[in-house]
Amino acid sequence: MKKILLNTKLSKIYVLGSILISFLLLASYFSYAMFTVSKEKSNAISIVTGNLTYDLKVDGEEGNTLTVPSGTSIEFIVTLSNPNERIARFNFYYLDEIPANVNVGYITDCETNPLPGATGVNLESSESIGSSNKYKIMVENNSSNEVVIELGVRVGLDYNDLSLPSNGHLFTEYTNEPNAPELDTNMIAVKYENNNWVKADISNANNDWYNYNEQKWANAVTVSSSTRESYKNASIGTIVNINDIETMWVWIPRYSYSIASEDGTNYYGRKGCYLESEPTLALPGEIDIRFVSNDIKDRGNAKYITTGAREYYTPDAFAFGDEELSGIWVGKFETSSSNPDASYGGGNTTELDAMIKPNVTSWRNINVSNAFNVSLKMNDEGNRYGLSSTVDTHMMKNSEWAVVAYLSQSRYGKLGNENFTGVNKEIYQNKSNQFITGCSYGNPSNENTDYGCQYTYDIDINGTGASTTGTIYGVYDMSGGAFEIVMGIYNNNLGNSGFITMPEVRYYDKYTDTNISLACNNRECLSHGLGEIAGWYNDAKNMITVTSPWVASSGYYYDTTDAGVFYFGRSNADASIYGSFRLSLNLGTIN
């Protein structure tokens, strides 16, 4: 990597009497000598000789110039790294005078701010040892000629042992890349193009497959055994016929989250860029999300006041037994069966196979133990999906439902989608009284009783508004349709689930109290979609009980304002004509 060497500037010099003059004279002999006050002793001076360096890249390429044609506005991702063995302080600016009608800025949460020029007040920040952070720089060229903006960086020793704050940097556009989706051998990455699902480039070159900043979550499918090899060998861009698809999945990358309070009392999320008014219970704000790697497991209290520091928590759903997951795949729609024309879309049996598709009847009237066993057999030897034995398929846990819901209420989900404003930030309800998967009413849950499938999942805005992203790339049927039983239970009270004994603990969430504030071993359950988001969007908040010990999510098609992604209710887990279930998939687990 190319290193750019700069003469360093003394940030602070503490002169402690004439006894130090000799040190200063000695230092002047070395043109790059540094002085810094040590943290341990305020009257000690460290002398560091040598050069400080930095690494600079523009859109992934080494360099420091931004070229913008006349009449265009371009955003650049500029990466600034500190390869030194010392904490360094940087001043970031553009070098030369720019022509009239040209604006240079850096983008923060909600606005573009002018990037200082060489003669102005410089944008100053500190970088910890080995850190690498990204900045979004915008150049708007309203002049009649192409312009080239040259970036400059001044670097000097930091006189404090500083580290990056928990949100990574002064800017929100820091290195915050989601973990790449993990595909099993016969899963096919897809994107939506010209009204069809097509085979995607898994290298994600030019954000071809996914781009969470644009509410484009990664999607993948499995196809019928008779077409599998053909699709696997097909070129990028080949249409994947919906009739050949058997299951559709959406990748939820590992993240940590924090929920803000704007008023210091009520934790309704952050107003951020996405609300026109202060967050309320009926119209909550942004859940702060930062994508993290497998080796990060934050255990903050998951709440902060917007005027203070954030504390992050990594959701429990990203741990499967003893394994820390880089992400999970979730069913894109409510589960349907290999015979969706059967009574209740499948009925109370394990003889049928699970399918995940739009525009079919969801699988209902099945008790929890049968739904659970249907999900487990999906990776049996010789299974119809081509899934390997290293895959773990299972019925969705309550904590897994919650990580989808929280991500939807972030800048990466429907909340951050600029095509929706105000009350339409809420995920639209599925009011299909025929329980057709992927349907949308074209509005959030409300008092209207004109049931049916008003819009299919692929209709832009009115249909895609029922997904967790507001785009076709999100997860559907999370508000209304059939209610969904999830694997969350009070003290292993089996109810009418059909279980004789509970399965391995990694397959379910156990709650130890019916008091929402004490449900996780006498503490509030962080990341489970219970107390911390209770009542958001006016969704129902009915905690499990001794007689109804299983958690239910999403609500019914006929629910009014109660239905929603933050709905939680209770059930005795019997086979209900109104109840369905959803699937999750992890890779790399040992069965």
Image: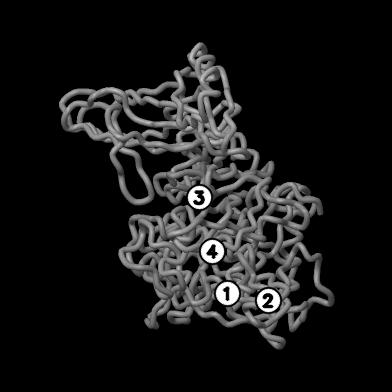
Question: Label 3 belongs to which residue?
Answer: 217
Q: Quadrant of residue 488?
A: bottom right
In three-dimensional space, the C-alpha distance between marks 4 and 2, rounded to whole angstroms, equals 18 Å
Label 3 vs 1, first from the N-terminus:
3
In three-dimensional space, the C-alpha distance between marks 3 and 2, rounded to whole angstroms, equals 32 Å
Identify the amino acid type marked 1.
Gly
Identify the amino acid type marked 4.
Lys
Identify the amino acid type marked 2.
Ala
Locate residue 195, reporting x and y percent.
41, 49
The residue sitting at 44% across, 71% down in the picture is 429
Label 4 vs 2, first from the N-terminus:
4
Q: Which mark is residue 303?
A: 4
- Circles 1 and 4: CB atoms closer than 8 Å: no
Q: Which mark is residue 150?
A: none
In three-dimensional space, the C-alpha distance between marks 3 and 4, rounded to whole angstroms, equals 26 Å
Vertical relation: 139 (above or below) 551: above
In three-dimensional space, the C-alpha distance between marks 1 and 4, rounded to whole angstroms, equals 12 Å
Foreground tag (1 vs 4): 4
Label 1 vs 4, first from the N-terminus:
4
- Circles 2 and 1: CB atoms closer than 8 Å: yes
Question: Label 1 belongs to which residue?
Answer: 531
Foreground tag (3 vs 4): 4
Question: Label 2 belongs to which residue?
Answer: 519
Label 2 vs 1, first from the N-terminus:
2
Label 3 vs 4, first from the N-terminus:
3
Locate residue 108, reporting x and y percent.
37, 46
Vertical relation: 577 (above or below) 206: below
